[in-house]
Amino acid sequence: MSSVKQEPSIYNNIWALGLVLFGLFCLILLTSFNRVGFPISSKVTGVVLFPFQGGFSAAVDGVTSATGFIYDVSTVYEENERLKQEVEELRKENLEASEYAAENERLRALLGYKEAKTQFDLLPARVIARENATWSSMIVINRGSNEGVSDLMPVVTDKGLVGHVIEAGPVSSKVRLILDPRSSVGTLVQRPESRVMGIVEGDINNAVSPRMVNIPLVADVVEGDMIITSGFGGVYPKGIMVGKVAGLKNAPGGLLKYAVIDTSVDFQRLEEVLVIIASREPPPAPLPKKEDKNGDKKEDTK
Amino acid sequence: MKKYARWFLFLIVLYSLQTSLLPIISYRGISPDLLLLLITSFALLEGAKYGTLMALGAGLLKGLGSGTFFGIDTFSFMIIAFFVGRSYNQVYREAKLLPLAASVGVTTLHYLIFASFMFMLGFRFSPLEHMQSVLLPMLLYQLVFSYPVHRLTVKMDAWTRREWSQNGS
């Protein structure tokens, strides 16, 4: 009778939505503990996003310089109106120079680390994107499988441990930071009298300080102890600096305690990182020198 | 097809801005969630059906692009877009305060959905402490960015509608 096209019932839409949500619910449960992944679609997304994220990331340097410049000029203006023009130009040059100097300093530190750590083959990379740290802590770097990066490779800076690669795309890779609640790193206390072991994991309550858990209540761990990787677990090589014990708290249950870790890497200012693409046993430390009867130092050859 | 390509490009640009540019103003790692604001505005303008579709795209992009907990964003975005879209006939869409008020509501809802999943997956945290350190700064960021994102979405929507009606396809 009527030729008016019938709108699909709202109940049909709700059913469709319910079905999709149920599918998503199952996917969440399967993927949250890495039982199922989407390597191909995830890599395609990485390739599509790479030029945009790379471009914006490069623009960030310019924005940082510009905002710093505006602040500087306004303070100089108050101080001396007559010299404004001159100061402005000098500051502009100075700003560029200091930006280069800061970058130079960072790269020099990374190079120094690379030369000092001969047991690692390191690949420098730039951070091009960062996920909101509400529930997880991830970054994206501008190196991928084309440059030899693969899953589970550790990522460091000259200051210490950053995290590990969880997904290497062709041109970019996703890195899970040690601050992520899903991350767990086998660690130990560096102090020779202690050497207590524990696991450093991200704290969901505190997005900037992870915790070292599973420490017995009577274990010899004190504030200020340096924490390094233990090498257990097969992902992180032994001896990489993780951070310093900032505080100790009793864990629920009363048998264990945990340490709040002040990370050695400043994750808020992460710009360049190094990917450990291969690691070997570190070369043996030089033998301690013994004094002979004449008072001269001699290498112990035993 | 062109219309969908434009929205897809808009989504990618917004997501790239969110992950590459906005972390420079982040507070303890917290920065605004532009995709959440986009799907809210889009659902207000286009209704539940298209809003939910946009939410599906935005959630998948976020899940695949970031390596965060896969699927939770999509799940939450779709529910939010559905409910916001259902109310699109009942609100005055030109109201200046609408995006601001909506941003507070949807951010809180998104947070609660995510928090429920985290509890369900076995991650334990203190809700009050977490809300104070994460939800509050997030709400402030969302409030600041809600109006600009809403205006951008309105402009984009008007542009695509205009072209759509001119081409008649």
Image (spheres, rainbow, N blue to C red):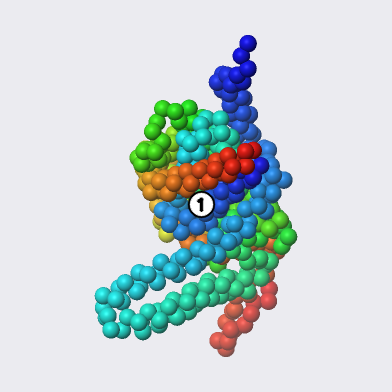
Residue A17 sits above or below residue A302 on the image: above
Residue drawn at (48%, 74%), measured in percent from left and top? A99
Q: Quadrant of the N terminus of chain B?
A: top right
Q: Which image quarter is the C terminus of chain B in? A: top right
Task: From this view, report whether residue A293 is shown above or below residue B96.
Answer: below
Residue drawn 66% across the image and 70% down it = A118
Which residue is the extreme one toward the bottom? A294
Given residues A294 and A130, the one toward you in this image is A130
Q: What is the chain identity of the residue bearing mark 1? A: B
Residue B75, given in percent of the width and then of the height, sits at 55, 33
- Residue farthest top in this picture: A1
**Camera-side residue of A133 and A225:** A133
Q: Nearer the viewer, residue A279 or B143?
A: B143
Relative to residue B57, is residue A275 depicted above or below?
Answer: below
Image point 44% across, 46% down: which residue? B151
Mark 1 lies on residue: B18
Helix, strand or loop at mark 1:
helix
Where is residue A167 drawn, in percent x and y? 66, 50
Residue A181 seen in this snapshot: no
- The residue type indicated by label 1 comes to Gln
Which picture quadrant has residue B90?
Answer: top left
In percent of the image, x 48 and y 46: which residue is there? B155
Q: Residues within 10 Å of mark 1 (few under 14, many from 20)?
A: many
> Percent from the top left, x then y, of residue B72?
55, 36
> Residue B29, can we see it?
yes
Numbered disc total:
1
Nearer-the-camera pick, B7 or A248: B7
- Percent x, y of residue B142: 41, 45
